[in-house]
Amino acid sequence: MATTSTTGSTLLQPLSNAVQLPIDQVNFVACQLFALLAAVWFRTYLRSSKTSSFVRHVVATLLGLYLALFCFGWYALHFLVQTGISYGIMVIMGAENMHRYCFVFALGYLIVCQITRVYIFDYGQYSADFSGPMMIITQKITSLAYEIHDGMFRKDEELTPSQRDLAVRRMPSLLEYLSYNCNFMGILAGPLCSYKDYITFIEGRSYHVTQAGADGKEEPHCERPEPSPNAAVSQKLLVCGLSLLVHLTVSNMLPVEHNIDARFRATASWPTKVIYLYVSLLAARPKYYFAWTLADAINNAAGFGFRGYDRNGEARWDLVSNLRIQQIEMSTSFKMFLDNWNIQTALWLKRVCYERATLSPTIQTFVLSAIWHGVYPGYYLTFLTGVLMTLAARTMRSNVRHYFIASPQLKWVYDVITWMVTQIAVSYTVVPFVLLSIKPSFTFYSSWYYCLHIIGILVLLLLPMKKTQRGKNTHENMQLSRSKKFDDTGNSLEQNSFSTTNNVCSQETASRHSLLKQ
């Protein structure tokens, strides 16, 4: 394992051999730790109050490109090519059409790179690769193109409240564009952030924000001193350390592949199969917790990610957070699990596809999510299974839940049962995403006799699917109502609908850029 080839630097090969991990994974972790130190230096010595935005942009960009070159070698040129051509498209096409052309080019370029990585290079090699960061850059390119289109071409009354907040009113310079896409804080593992949030941070305006007032609305508090991210960073680094420890110990002892071992399938009892499925997928999650939480800590250490103050006056550093671990592990529904996993990708899917689609927005969003993830067949099996599981879970909940909320005791029983069902259903759904290939994926599902697929289909056939006003309003909002009252209401409703149905293919995207997959 430790001798795995890499297109990046081999400087750390002795360390790779010592820890028995692939060199590309060692490079990734080393670069992220370097980025963490650079972030502290950036916040300390290049503070916006003492340093011009130009210098901060240049330093953030150069550091980011250096990390990309160290990890991926000449493959890092893809980042510059994708970013540079997209900027040219924006300048040439103008605000009216740039969003369409940037979307097609950025996603198409990503797909070509993913195909070459899978089918020209080693199919099963699943470690550090250049297409992982390109997935985040693709999100940034497409998001910004739509935000500029909203801010410079569309009328304010045509926009939803979130679109108005994110709308960009002027074309960014080439330096600003490169800095946004390739800065050292997010080039390797993201997460996605909005362009306005990033520019606000670079220019030092992110601390002149808000505090939740007694009425729940946010009020400006410009006189507050600049908050320190040290507590938030320390807490997140502790989570990273624990996650990495679990990944390096427990995860290797509980491989997901053991679910399709011939002897295990032939001899294990059903309770053993169910328990092992859950614990093996549970053990597979810490590597994502590590990668995402470390990326979040890097941004916070640089001073980015400050959302404002809560009602108690405490600083919130979760603007670019990508997951909430406690809610994930204690989820009692598919919706709760997906709402707290890969949060920024879910927001991207909503902003560039779901709320803009005029025909079958849910289907279009699922298709975009599947295409963006890559070309491994296991992704699409998880995608199709996830659609079925999501619809079945929603139907079951709408038909059963009201019988169990009459008393605290019944509600507790309901929560315990739904927690167990949710964790098993999620694990069952994402196994192909881990196995990647068609044959082992079908081997697993056949060993379970496709039981959850069958149950999901029976639920949809036998139980009435109750229509909600939420779905109706979501579709109407796609038509861009000009009534502000409806706009405010519709946006809230569509957010709830979207989060239930459109995270399934997003839930394992960290596997492409966490770079800690065995």
Image (tube, rainbow, N blue to C red):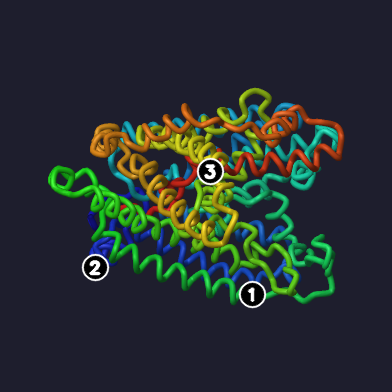
Q: In the rendered structure, which amino acid carries the disc numbered 2?
A: Ala
- In this rendering, position of residue 490 left or right of residue 517: right
Q: Residue at x 61, y 57 (%)?
A: 320
Q: Residue at x 26, y 57 (%)?
A: 254
Residue 79 appears anywhere in the view: no
**Residue identified by numbered label 3:** 400
Q: Tell me: residue 317, above or below residue 313.
A: above
- In this rendering, position of residue 446 left or right of residue 109: left
Q: In the rendered structure, which amino acid carries the disc numbered 3?
A: Val
Q: Residue at x 71, y 34 (%)?
A: 469
State the separation of the CA atoms marked 3 and 2. 55 Å
Mark 3 element type: helix
- Between 264 and 200, which is closer to the camera in this rendering? 264
Q: Earlier in the sequence, mark 3 or mark 2?
A: 2
**Residue identified by numbered label 2:** 18
Of labels 3 and 1, the one closer to you: 3
Rendered location of residue 390, percent (x, y): 50, 38
Mark 2 element type: helix
Residue 251 appears anywhere in the view: yes
Q: Tell me: residue 4, above or below residue 79.
A: below
Rendered location of residue 150, percent (x, y): 77, 36
Q: Quadrant of residue 314?
A: bottom right
Marks 2 and 1 in Cβ contact (< 8 Å): no
**Residue identified by numbered label 1:** 44
- Between 177 and 207, which is closer to the camera in this rendering? 207
